[in-house]
C-alpha cells in the first residue's frame, strides 16, 4: 500500500492513477500523516446476463398434485 500526502496530489494525480490502474494496488491519501482517503482500482461489477436461472432445467410435477388435501381443509377449519 502506498501513502501520499494531500499536498502532493495536484502534481502527481495523473501519474498516481496510472500507477493504480497498472499495478491494481490501492493508495492511501493522508493529511498531516493521518489517512483521509483511499484510491482503489476500479473493478466493474459482474452483472448476470442469465436472467432465468431455472431455464433449461426439467419440470417435475408430482403424480398427486391435483388431488384433494383433506388434512389442509381440516387445519383451516373448513
Image (cartoon, helix red, strand yellow):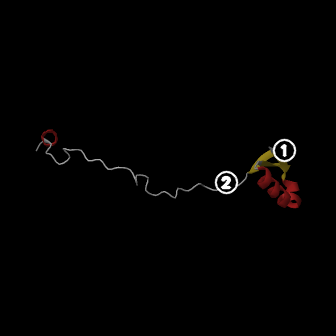
Q: Position of residue 56 (x, y in %)?
A: 40, 53
Q: Which residue is at a point 43% across and 56% down the rendered structure image?
A: 52
Within-10-Å neighbours for mark 2: few <14, some 14–19, many 20+: few
Measure the alpha-carbon separation of dots 1 and 2.
Answer: 28 Å
Q: Which residue is at a point 78% across and 48% down the rendered structure image?
A: 28
Q: Position of residue 2 (x, y in %)?
A: 82, 46
Dot 2 lies on which element? loop
**Disc on res. 72:** none
In the rendered view, tell whether residue 18 sits above or below residue 73: below
Q: Which residue is at a point 80% across and 57% down the rendered structure image?
A: 17
Q: Are marks 1 and 2 in contact (CB under 8 Å)?
A: no
N-terminal of the pair, mark 1 or mark 2, is: 1
Name the image quarter holding residue 75: top left
In the rendered view, tell whether residue 10 sits above or below residue 30: below
Badge nearest the viewer, 1 or 2: 2
Can you say which quadrant of the picture contains the N terminus?
top right
Q: Which residue is at a point 84% across and 44% down the rendered structure image?
A: 33
**Disc on res. 33:** 1
User: Which residue carries the number 2 mark?
Assistant: 43
Of the pair 17 and 28, the residue shown nearer to us: 17
Q: Position of residue 15 (x, y in %)?
A: 85, 58
Can you say which quadrant of the picture contains the C terminus?
top left
Within-10-Å neighbours for mark 1: few <14, some 14–19, many 20+: few
27 vs 45, left or right, is right
70 vs 18, left or right, is left
Q: Position of residue 5 (x, y in %)?
A: 85, 50
Of the pair 62 and 4, the residue shown nearer to us: 62
70 vs 35, left or right, is left
Q: Residue furthest left?
A: 78
Dot 1 lies on which element? loop
Amino acid at each position: 500500500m502506498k501513502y501520499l500526502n494531500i499536498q502532493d496530489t495536484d502534481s502527481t494525480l495523473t501519474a498516481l492513477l496510472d500507477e493504480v490502474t497498472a499495478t491494481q494496488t490501492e493508495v492511501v491519501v493522508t493529511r498531516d500523516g493521518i489517512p483521509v482517503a483511499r484510491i482503489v482500482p476500479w473493478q466493474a461489477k459482474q452483472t448476470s446476463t442469465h436472467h432465468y436461472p431455472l431455464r433449461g432445467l426439467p419440470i417435475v410435477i408430482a403424480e398427486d398434485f391435483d388431488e384433494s388435501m383433506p388434512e389442509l381443509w381440516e387445519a383451516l377449519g373448513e
